[in-house]
Amino acid sequence: MRPSATESLYRDLEAHYGQDGYFLPRHMLLRPLTVKDVDQVEELEKASYPESEAASRESIQYRLTACSELCVGLFSCEYNWDQPSSNEEDDDREDSVVSKSSTLKKETLIGYILATKITGEFISDEDMKVGSNKEDGRTIAIHSVVISKEYRDRHFGYIMLKDYIQKFYGLCTADRISIIVLPKLRGFYERHGFTDCGVSECQLGGETWHNMKLPFDTYDE
């Protein structure tokens, strides 16, 4: 495994783009997605993409089953806090500490990344089909990057993608990350080190998409 991902790269990016260091609130959690999350993912997918571009439930379920390790979700969490009763005689002591524990009550999905592995350098229409994941592929193909509308413009997408890149750079299980994006979104991915490689052959939704990739071997440590 490589040393902790790309701290120097992100310091350079943040200095260049004026990012002062973004952090998730304590009640938010990034974790791998599983097939148990399919309902929340499908709901957010439909709310975030036009029907012609949104992944079907079958595609989502396939990705969460075949390659869940490549899929991550950002959740807003609600907890039940348990506070044990304390001895009233000790309440006024300066060294009196009341410990608390919590149990997870509810997780609400507010963002996610869905991906598969492919053998080529760029995503094709075939790579988006059910059954297309290639376990021996060296390219991580990102198919969806979503943040719920009510949580946008708060840097959560930046944090989620940054964490994702760092994770897989450190794991050494791929040589690059590839994605297709609409021209208006290229700037967001360029901030993370992706390079625009020209117009994609993909015909998704009848739109013009651009291939973008992030090669791990050009990372500046």
Image: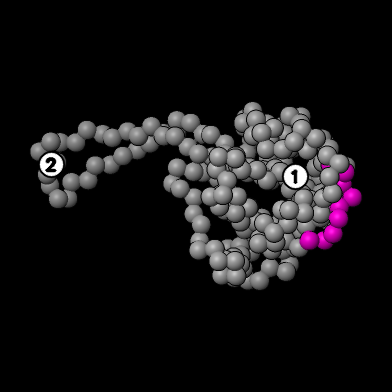
Residue at the image point whose x is 50% and y is 39% from the top: 76
**Which residue type does callout 2 highlight?**
Asp
In the rendered image, residue 31, in percent from the top left (x then y), is placed at: 57, 43
In the rendered image, residue 159, in percent from the top left (x then y), is placed at: 57, 53
Quarter of the image for residue 163 reads bottom right
Q: Is residue 104 magenta?
A: no
Q: Is residue 218 above or below residue 53?
A: below
Which element is circle 2 on? Answer: helix
Q: Which residue is mark 2?
A: 90
Q: Which residues are magenta?
A: 196-204
Residue at the image point whose x is 38% and y is 32% from the top: 80
Q: Nearer the viewer, mark 2 or mark 1?
A: 1
**Mark before the other along the chain sequence, 2 or 1:** 2
Residue 101 visible within the image: yes
Residue at the image point whose x is 57% and y is 46% from the top: 152
Left/right of residue 150 with respect to residue 78 in the rendered view: right
Quarter of the image containing the C terminus? bottom right
Q: Is residue 199 magenta?
A: yes
Residue 119 visible within the image: no
Residue at the image point whose x is 89% and y is 50% from the top: 201
Q: Which residue is mark 1?
A: 143
**Which residue type does callout 1 highlight?**
His
Q: CA distance from mark 2 to mark 1?
A: 57 Å
In the rendered image, residue 20, in percent from the top left (x then y), is placed at: 50, 63
Quarter of the image containing the N terminus? bottom right
In this view, the residue farthest toward the front is: 184
In the rendered image, residue 114, in percent from the top left (x then y), is placed at: 70, 43
Q: Is residue 8 above or below residue 108?
A: below
Numbered-mark total: 2
Left/right of residue 86 with respect to residue 44 in the rendered view: left
Which element is circle 1 on? Answer: strand
